[in-house]
Every structure is written in C-alpha cells, then in structure tokens.
Amino acid sequence: MTTETLMWLIPLPPVLTFALIVLFTNRSKTLSHTLAVGAAFLSLLGSMIVFVSALGVEHLGEHPFESSVNWLPLGESVETYFKIGVLVDPTTAVVLFFVAITIFMIFLYSVGYHNFGQPEGDHDHKGLPPHGATVEEHGHKHAVPSVEPMYSRFFAFLGLFAFGMYVLVLSDNLLTFFVGWEIMGLCSYLLIGFWYAKPSARDAAVKAFMTTRIGDVFMLLGIAYLYYATGTLTFREIFTEEVLHTLATVPSGFLGFSAAGLIGLLLFIGTVGKSAQFPLHVWLPDAMEGPTPVSAMIHAATMVSAGVYAVVRMFPLISLDARTMTIVAFIGAFTAIFAATIAVAQNDIKRVLAYSTISQLGFMIAALGIGAYVAAVFHLITHAFFKALLFLGSGSVIHGMEHGVLHTGNHHVDPQDMFNMGGLRRKMPITFWTFLIGGFALAGFPLITAGFWSKDEIFADAFANGHWAVFITLALAAFMTAFYTMRQITLTFLGEPRTQEAEHAQETPWTMTTPLIILSIFAIAYGWVGIPEDFMGLPLQPNWLHEFVGGTLAEHPETIAFSWIPLLTSLVVALGGLYLGWMTYRSVSSPAEDRFQIPLLKNKYYFDEFYDRAFVKPAYWFAENVVYRFLDQGVIDGILHSFGPATDRLGSIIRNNFDLPVINRFFGDGSAEVTYRAGDKLRAVQTGRIQQYLMLALVVFIAIGAVLYFFLMA
Amino acid sequence: MNFIDAQLLSLILFVPAIAAVIILFFPDGENKLIRWFAFGASLIPFVLSLVAWFRFDANQPGFQFEESYVWYEAIGSSFHLGVDGLSLTMVLLTTLLTPLAILASFTITDRVKWYMMLFLFLETGMLGVFMALDLLIFFVFWEVGLVPMYFLINQWGSANRNYASLKFLIYTMGGSLGLLLAIQLLGVLFQTFDLVTLYERWNSIDPATPLLGMSVSTVKTVAFWAFAIAFAIKVPIWPFHTWLPDAHTEAPTAGSMLLAGVLLKLGAYGFLRLILPLYPDEARIFAGVLALLATAAIVFGAFASYAQTDFKRLVAYSSVNHMGFVVLGIAAAALAAGTNDANIALNGAILQMFNHGLSAAGMFFLVGVIYERTHTRDLEKFGGLFPLVPVYGGILIFTSMASLGLPGLNGFISEFLVVRGSWPILTVYTVISMLGLLFTGAYILKGIKKVLHGPLNEHWAHGEHRLTEINAREVLVMVPLMALILWIGIWPAWILDVINKAVVTLF
C-alpha cells in the first residue's frame, strides 16, 4: 500500500465504527468498545506509518504526500471541477502524530471512565450520569460505581469525533477541512450534551454549537471569498507565489484590507469560535458538562487544536496582511491573560483546566500573530499532550472522589470541587505523579517539561522580534498559569484530606492510569525535539522540530539567536508562580480563606450574563415579537386579512348602490312593475267577448295596413 | 419496450392519474387494498423516472424524451413534454417523494379511497408542471395541482384547516391570474405557446417595434412581474410567505411532505424555466429586489422559526429560510448571467431545491410521527423523550442536521455553492444571509432541545400515554431520504453533474 492510499484510509476506521455501533452493535457494550478502541488503534497505526515515512523524505515541504480526486462537477470542463484530496506535509505529519496518540489514549481511558465491567446502576437513567449500584458481597451490601447506561453510544460519538479530526488534519483543501471542522462541532454538541437529561448539559451543548457557529459562518464567507478570488481551495494551489502576491495586492474594499487580509480575518473568526478565543470563549468552560474524556477530546486532541491548526494551515495567507496579524496577536495575547485571571478564582477542578486551555490557546494564537510559526506548532503539540494528560488526570481524580462519595453515601459533596479534596497524593499515587508532570508542563517547569521548551520558544521569538507588548503580556499570563496550576495541585493532592470522601478516594483502574502514564512521558519528552541549537551557548544538535516543521513554509523561518532575557523571564515566571502558588495555598482549607475568590473573577467577568442580556434574550424577543408577531402576523397577515373585508365591502357597495337600486329595483323590479301595471291596465281589454276581440283585430289590422301602405307605397 | 421508450414521460405523468381513476372503482371499505394499490401504483412512475434518469444523456444539450401531441390547435397550443437536467431532477424528486408520502399515510382511516385518489392526482399535477414545454399545458398543470392539495388540507387537516386551505388556494390562485394573462400575452403575440419556440423568438424581438401600443420593455416588464409574483408566492419569497406556515401546519403529514418537498419547488422551477430564459434583461434589472427579498426570507424565516412553540410550524418556517437560498442563487445568476459565478450559484440553487425536498419532507414526516402518537405539536409539552424513542431520536437528529446544513450532509453542498456563487455578485446580501444561517442553527437546536433533551416529561413515560418507538413502516419512509441525504453530502457528483450540464447549456 502506498502512503497516499494509507492517508485516505486513516479517517475511515472510526467512522465505520460509528456506523457499525449505531446500526448493529449498540446493545453489546463489549463489542462496541472493542470496535471503537480497535478502530482508534488502526488509525493510530496508519498515522504512525505515515509519520515515519514523512520523516524519511527530504524536503517534504516542497514534495509532500498528496493525492486528490474530482469531487464537484462545476463549470464547463474537468479542469474546473472541484477537487478534494489528502495532504501530508511536515506540519501535518507532526500534528497527525499527536492527534493519533491522544485520540487513542482517550478511547482507551473511556473504557475505565465509564465503569466498564461494573454492574448496571440501581436507578440509572439514560441521559443522566450513572449513580452507582449496590452489590452484595460476603453478606453485606455496599455501593460500587455503575456502568454508563449509554456506553455504546458514547463510543459511537467518539468515533465520529475522531473521524472529523482526521479528515480535518489530512485535508488538502479548505472545504473538506471545513467538513471535518463542522463534524467535530456536531460531535462536541452531542458529547457535551451526552447527559442530555441534565438541563445544564443540554444548555451547554447548545451554547457550544451556537457560539462556534458564529465563527463558522464567518469562516464560510472567508472560504467563499477565497474560492472566488483564487478559483481553488486546495492549499498548495493557493500557497504559490503568484496567487499569494495577487491576494496581497488586490484590495478587498473593506476598511482598506487587502483580499488576503480580509480572507485571513474571516477565517480567523472561525478560529476564534473554535479555539474559544475572546470574545467567543464562553462556550468552552461550560463544555465541562460532558463526560471527562470528552473534555480531553475537545480541549486537547481535537476541537480547540483544530482552531489553531486552521491558522497554522492558512499561515502563508494570513501572514500577508500586517493588520490581520496584529489583530490575531492582540486577540491571542489578550485571551491568554484574560483567561488566566479567571482560572485563578475557579474551584471546580475541570473549570480551572478549561480556562487554562483558553489561556494556552491564546499563547499559540499570539505566537502565530507575531509570526512565530514553529513555536506555535510546538506549543500546540506539547499542550495537546499535557492538557490531555491533565484532563484525563482530573477525570481520574473525580472518579476517585466519586468512589469516596459512593462509600460515604453523601451525594451532596461535589466530587469536582477542589476544596473537597486534599491529600489525594497518597490515595491516588499514579494519578498524582502524572498530574504533577502535566501541571508542571503547563506551568513551564524549566528544562524537564515539554511545556517549558515550547513556551520558551514563544518568548524567545517575541523578544527577538521586538514584540514587547506580546512578550510582557504572555510573561504575566505564564506567571499566573504557574500560580493557578500550583494552587490546583496543592488543593487537590497536597496537605490532608478535607472531607470523608477524599479520605476514601481510590486509585482508578489500569485502563485509566495507563493512558496517564503514556501521556506523561510525552509531556516531558516531546519538549526535547525542539531544544534550540545554541541553548545557553551549549553546542547542541540542530533544533529538529524547527528544521522539520519550518520546511512546510516556502521560506524557512530563521533560527533565533539565543538570548538570556527571555530564558530568565521564563524561569522566573514559572518557578516564581509555582512557589507563590504553593506558599499561598498550602495552608488554605476553605474558599473563605482564599484571597482570590473575587466575585468579578469568579463570575468570569459576567460575560455569560452580559451575552445573555445583550444577545440571546434580545434575539429571541426580536424573533418572537418583531418578526413573528409584528411582521408576519400583524403586518403581512393584517394586509392579507384586510382583503377579505375589503372585498366584502366592495361587494356590498356594488350590491347596495348598483345591484339593488339599478339592476333589481330599476331593471328587475322596475320591469316587473311595468309589466304588472301594463297587465293590470290591459286587463280591461280582456273581456272574454269574441265580438270585441274580432273588432280589435280588425282595428289593428287596418292600422298596420295603413302604416305599411304609408311607408312602403309612399 | 418501444412503447415505453416512446411514451416514457407520458407514462410517468399519467400512470398516477389512471391509478386514481381505477381506485374510484374499488369498494369503499377495502382500506388495506387501496393503500397498497396506491403505493404500488406510485412506485411505477418512480421506476420509470429512474429509467429516464439512467437513459438521460447529460452531455446532450436541449430537451430529451420529447413528446408532442395535438391539443388545442386553434390557438397554437400543443401537448408538448420534455425534460432536461433541471426538470429531470425535479421529476425524480417528485416520483420519489410521492410513494413515501403515500407510505406515510397508511395510518389515515378516514375516506382512504378519496385521500389516495387525491394524492395520485396531485402527483400528476406536479409532474406535469415539470415536464410541460408548452406554456398553456404548464398553466393547466399548475392549477391542477392546487385542487387536490386544497381538499387534502381542507378535509384531512387539523383544527384550523378551513382558514389554511382557503388562504392557500386563494393566495396561489391570485398569483396565477397574472401568470395566465402573461401567458395569454405571449400566445397572442406569437401564435404559439411552445416554450422551445418562445425561447428563441421572444428574445429576438426588435426592441424598437411597439407591441400592443406600448414599448417592448414595458410589455416585458409587466409580463415579467406577472410571472414573478405568481412564482414568488409559490416559492414563497418574503413577504408572500404567510400562507405557508398555515398550510403546512394544518395539512395532514403526507400533505406537508409534498407541499414542502415538491410544491414549493414549482415556484423556484418557474423562475428557472421561464423567468431567467424569457426575461434575462428584466431579471437582471430586478435581481436586486429579488435578492433583497430572498435575504429577508432567509433571515426573517430563520427568526420566525426560532420564535415558534409549535413543532410543525417551526419546521414550516424553516422552508422559508431554506428556499431563500434558492432564490438568492437565482438572483445572483440573473445579475451575472453567463459567468462562472452565476453557474455555481445556479448549481447551488437547483441542488438546494432537491436537498430541501429531501430534508423538509423528512422533517415533516418526523413531526407527523410524534404528532400521531401524542396528538400535540406543542414543544413545551415534549421534553426528554430521547430515552423512550432512541431510534426516532437518532433519525430526528440526523434529519435536523441535514436541515441545518451540516457539512457531510446534502444541505451544506448546496448552501455552500449558493454562498460561493453569490458572494462576488451580491456580497452584502450574502453577508446578511449568514445571520439567517446562524439562526438556522438556533431553531434546529431548539427543536431537538425541546423534544429530545432535557428532563423527561413523565406524562409520556407510563400508561396509555406511553410514547411508542417509531415503527418499521415509518423507518422505511425515512431510509431512502436519509440514504440520499448522506449520499449527496458525501458524493454529490452523480446529481450535480446532471444539474451542472443543464446549467451550462441552458443559461
């Protein structure tokens, strides 16, 4: 099999799984998860083969693996047909690498997370999280976790999700890219709302779909514009010198943007939605309503990464217009610090991670905005690994806590609230150590973790190219990141258990811990592929990632000379933040003692409330009262209904003023009257005497004869 | 086989009518027999139109399978039938949806005989419009289709059926008055109603010679608007749309399926078959108005749909929203006829007609399925039904997503092509229509949220009210629709190729 054929095949196993589970195997939990995990493994295998072949090709950037077919017949000849295909260039290869691994880990983890092998719940309902089951062992009853009632369905959706991501990553054109993009939108909707009977989950699902759709409609316009301007949507046909030159020089007629600038901006709005950047960030924290593997799927492996990947993919086009790039950099940097401040005040273990995701995505977007292409890709990959690790880790923690809740039977204890935890390092050692690695990677703990190297590269790039505002903003955001990460670790794992439930928490099964261990290896080791060549003046190997990924661009990005300032900044913010976080929270045991429970931060700057009042409610009000009741039922139907009475009135006018007096009375009744009266008068003539009749006949005869004679003879 | 070859279109056209006449002689009580007979009879035109589809040579310009019979010689009208890629697509849609609609009506128990007869007559009426190549025949079938639908709504509809059926009938008839006059005008001028001849002669009139004492452009403008208003009401274009939610909501399920699936397409078909070729100049001049109204339909249709609390009305308004894209594509094509952008827009518009036929028919059927069981359409009375009816829920989500325009399903392809085609021609309107696309998402998700998601409404969970799962017959209605929705979404080439070639040669 050629690599190209294999590239076509990679997305297929998960989608086939989806179809098979939905149509046939949904009653069998074992069969469904075997199919799903097997499919994820096949895709992983295919991706690894493609990745390895990609490594072996010199100048992959100029000669990528590609293959395409005619898809939409448009216009007059086969040349104008719309083609779709697959493409693997260096960036795709490295993205495919992390996507395949994280997806497989999430699939595997889901088996344990949904309590496979446990009994059915006592009173579990479809559409609600499992509540646990009672089992009898050795004569006494105790509560154990129960298996998810919609277990098979979960794997089906997960398969479709994976399919969407693979389609997106492997696409050689923007249209199928968008197809994958939207399929993921659907899957995030289905999975965030997986426990659809919970109103909060249901609303979060709708919110996620609608918020990202705002970005998507702009992106669709951008795609339409790009297709119009270039006649193609295939990446490699767009990224040629003359096409890019044309796009950069043709004005768009909108606020002085060039065509490239406006297209770039429209596409970027899509990313703002998908990657939850300010001001469309509101959906991502609510996405926590879904089961935790979904959070990992959305936050690390697929959806939000897809948003950044879109900018990465379209970088040659977006980077043409300086104003668009400034907007990108501003949105990214602002989001990075904005979300970090909110994360400090959250108590839900998953919500902290959610805001950290938004903030880290801001780092990547900001990096792209200042042109640090390789650094952004690097951070995208390392973040995917450590964020997947952290989410799965938090899921493991919650699972452990739920175990405690089942043990004590006190269902009022929120197993996600970090203030209910504490001391879990002894109860859940694997989870603790892997979470620590993930947390330190997020915080950018120097030298060891992958997060340090990728974040450092962003700092170095911003510093070297004089983007001071971005540099300082991101440094502050990084400091806060380290701070809230340590707050999270301290509150969750360190100290002593603060509740009975935490006391009885339990380590999770191997299907959950194995993915944690594997991901934690990547959360450390992946950083090593991108160590700068002259780091601290040491004679090191060339930066592999820079060489490889940089080859994607037509112009290989320059290597940045080493400088101590960004390195020291990076060290200070990471270590300083971690230390301060530990110092502040090691003795805090309740929200009341937490100095950062500021209402403004805790309520996320009231954005949800603001959007609700400013957009959601008015939109419904407008729809119902203006469009439906006023326009349709009032004005339009009002006019239509007036036709009835108007015709009626016209009819009565005709009847009363013409029909009745003229036709009826004058002609109708009138003629009858005339006839009647005439008859009445003439009645006198009808005497019944034959002599009179004959006499009359004679008179008439003579009269007619006289008249005839007069006219004819004269 | 020779007979079939030579009379293929006539057969497709008249088999339903003949079957309806045969049903007349069935004994009254034999409901089962009548149902199956009607269903079987409606499959014949479907099979025959498949034959036509496969024998159709897309590369050959002009009309195929033409038939012409003497009809009304004195005024120059002949019974002239023929199809090209545009009309064949619509014929296929009609002959596909009718058997499904009949299958969907198996639960009707009231006057089954008359019901089925009306349905079959309706099919003949609709097919005639798509096949006619003579304006008078076109008009005859245009009106013939109205009558059965009027009675279907009026006799088998729900509570407010009298109002809805009257509104539907009078509105459409009102629109077609102008159409009839304009057709007469053409007949008087050229002594023929033959469309193929008219295509050539109408546009080669010397603009300097006065017609009927007026300048050519005045006459054409008047005739253009007479045509346009008739079709605009049928599509329907905002603000002529308010008959639609009433008629769709009150009609029996299968009636709504065909109303949305096919009858609305008659209007759009009129624009494509008659207005664009006969009035290219007027269409270009007034394309701005058309685009404005189309955008209004897209945006206001979506908003109005979002405002509904009646499930069926929500779906009904979605038709206004979706058909707006068809008209937007037509307006763009009228404005820039002959360009590649116009071709793409038209491809999108025609495919959107077909796609909307599939998804709207599916949506109305699914509303009908739940209405039959619960006897309510009030969204507030449902809630959390997913665990009770998982299969139904899955099908509903699938069809809703097609309606929403999810990439990977059919609606996306056509909407994308319309947006792509009209972007360079009608940029501002295209941008505004995105607001409609956004709210398409809002109302679709609202429907799913209110019906399937959320806490279970216990009323439907127990006892006599217990909601039963969608049955095999109902699944059978949905399977062809869903298969096509998916197939066109993934591999649209088979149908788009036929449409594209028709567009390239026709406009």
Image (cartoon, coloured by chain):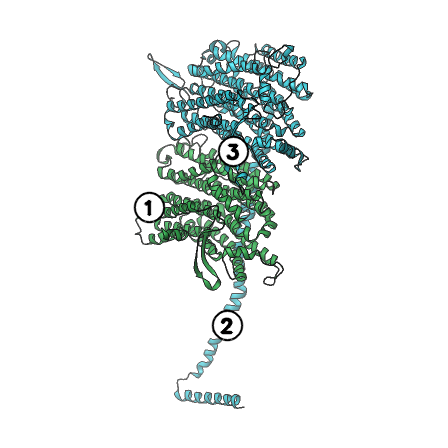
Chain colours: A cyan, B green
Q: Secondary structure at mark 3?
A: strand
The answer to whether residue A498 shows anywhere in this view is: no
Q: Nearer the viewer, residue A611 or A110?
A: A110
Q: Secondary structure at mark 2?
A: helix
Q: Point out the tag, 3 or 2, that comes first from the N-terminus.
A: 3
Which residue has dot 1 on it?
B36
Image quadrant of residue A575?
top right
The answer to whether residue B304 shows anywhere in this view is: yes
Amino acid type of the residue that numbered disc 1 sits on in the rendered structure: Trp
Which residue has dot 3 on it?
A84
Q: Chain of mark 2?
A: A
Which residue has dot 2 on it?
A670
Please give the count of numbered marks on the rendered protein.
3
Name the spot of residue A712 as percent of width and height, x first: 51, 88
Amino acid type of the residue that numbered disc 2 sits on in the rendered structure: Gly
Q: CA distance from mark 3 to mark 1?
A: 44 Å
